[in-house]
Image: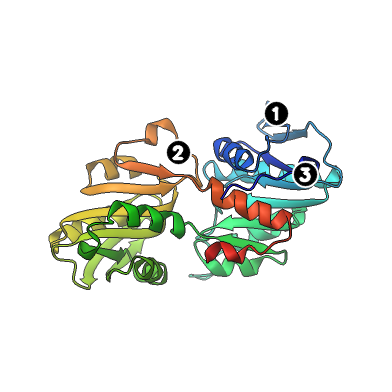
Amino acid sequence: MTSTIRNNDGIKIFSCNANPQLAEAIAADLGLTLGAADVGQFSDGETYVKIDEIVRGVDCYIVQPTSSPVNDNLMELLIMIDALRRASAGRITAVLPYYGYARQDRKTRARDPISARLIADLIQSAGADRALVMDLHCSQIQGFFTIPVDHMLGAPLLVKYYREKFANDMENIAMVSPDIGSVKRTRAFAEKLDIPMAIIDKRRPEANVSEVMNIIGNIKGKKVILVDDMIDTAGTICNAVNALKEQGAVEVYACCTHAVLSGPAIERIQKSQIKELVVLDTIALPEEKKIDKIKQLSVAQILAEAIHRIHCNKSVSKLFN
């Protein structure tokens, strides 16, 4: 999939501090080095950005997932966009492997904010001409932007991984959706692997607390794969694993695109009956979160190919074929 860009003067990849390893991998896949920039904080905590090379008329891409610390990473992105715009960059694309605040995408109670829309407005107001995102929590967030948005999916990487892992045992595998909201994602995943699926029906009494109710579908005697777009505190996944084991699942695997893994997540996963958790590197995984049960795959090639196609005015949708 590697697509080395010959015209190095026409494109530059920049990174802030959220996930420089991913940015470097994307640049390397394109045959480039990261653009020179200094991103840090003043003594009072304010963010500063200094672009150390000419970008006038250049197609610029900023790789910055807005993961924890969310507000610091968001400000780095916004200020770098502004810096590039004022330096007369030809086009600025915000590459957000993980889009923070995506879960606040609608009003569920009176006087709730719609923070996902606010973030889109801020990115556009800062001066971004385009956004490249991956596995939005809600795909309708694309509609919050008035600039073009390319929405990449992590599922092909995960499908490829499980197709190879269970190549000789596919008849004993089933996909499971951890909640009703993930049914569409799980069904598409199951169809690609040509395996059956089940659904966990749960109710969430309050934020970050989930209660598993029952399982729709037969998973007895099966190795099951739980799939979700993100895992935050891991309460949902770990409760789901317990329920699946009680219903007769032989082994439980789990996968997600975004490994948020906040609060007690690592401890819960370590103590759970999850056989293996596969995550993508849209969010940098610090050393203290790298445990034996967690395997990380890279999205660098997917994002590099998307950047190459955007830069060369080629179809991005063909990446899903």
Left or right of 210: which side holds 59? right
Task: Give the percent coordinates (x, y) of residue 223.
Answer: 21, 58
Numbered mark located on residue 285 in the image: 2
- Labels 2 and 1: the sequence-earlier one: 1
Q: CA distance from mark 2 to mark 3?
A: 33 Å
Look at discs 2 and 3 and give the one toward the viewer: 3
What residue is drawn where x is 56% and y is 39%?
A: 19
| Visible residue check, residue 292 | yes
Task: Give the percent coordinates (x, y) of residue 63.
Answer: 63, 45
Local secondary structure at mark 2: loop
Identified by mark 2, the residue type is Leu
Look at discs 3 and 1 and give the one toward the viewer: 3
Left or right of 54: which side holds 17? left
Which is more toward the observer, 311 or 291? 311
Contact, mark 2 vs mark 3 (Cβ under 8 Å) = no
The residue singled out by tag 1 in the image is 42
Does 171 appear above or below 282? below
**To which quarter of the image does residue 243 belong?**
bottom left
Numbered mark located on residue 7 in the image: 3
